[in-house]
Amino acid sequence: MIRHVTMRGRVQGVGYRMFVEHEALTRGIEGWVRNRRDGSVEAAFAGPAQPVEGMIAACRIGPPGGHVDALDQREGTEDELKLRASGDLFSVLASA
């Protein structure tokens, strides 16, 4: 299962990307996370359905100091997953 998610709210400047990276690695999920210029954070998650759904649920909550107003998700693609750094299970990418 590959899911692409976008979180909006107070999700930049609060450690949101590091939170996502930690949660993903803890769950054994492949993918990446990055800030967007519009103030949102986007991510791609790949793995078995249950851990990926748990990851998305964690993203709805976010880290202390953050606040997620909206979370959009859709089916992700193999091409999106390839954006992560070579050799990484999960990457924090440069802003887009």
Image (spheres, helix red, strand yellow):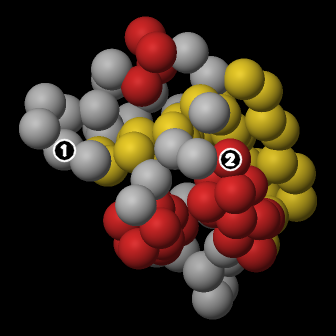
Question: Which residue occupies 42% across, 25% down?
Answer: 81
Label 2 crowd bin: few (<14), some (14–19), many (20+), radius 10 Å: few
- Kind of element beneath mark 1: loop
Q: Are marks 2 and 1 in contact (CB under 8 Å)?
A: no
Quarter location, residue 12: bottom right
Question: Which residue occupies 13% across, 30% down?
Answer: 86
Up-down relation of residue 29 to residue 58 (above or below) = above
Disc number lying in front (2 or 1): 2
**Is residue 68 among the parts visible in the rendering?**
yes
The quarter of the rendered structure image containing the N terminus is: top right
Q: Position of residue 42 (x, y in %)?
A: 58, 40
- Precedes in sequence: disc 2 or disc 1: 2
Q: Position of residue 30 (x, y in %)?
A: 39, 45
- Kind of element beneath mark 2: helix
Disc 2 designates what residue? 49
Up-down relation of residue 27 to residue 49 (above or below) = below
Between 51 and 7, the one lying in front of the other is: 51
Disc 1 designates what residue? 88
Up-down relation of residue 12 to residue 5 (above or below) = below
Quarter location, residue 50: bottom right
Q: Position of residue 84 (x, y in %)?
A: 29, 32
Q: Position of residue 63 (x, y in %)?
A: 60, 80
Between 9 and 43, the one lying in front of the other is: 43
Q: Amino acid at mark 1?
A: Asp
Question: Which residue occupies 26% across, 47% down?
Answer: 89
* Residue at the extreme top: 79
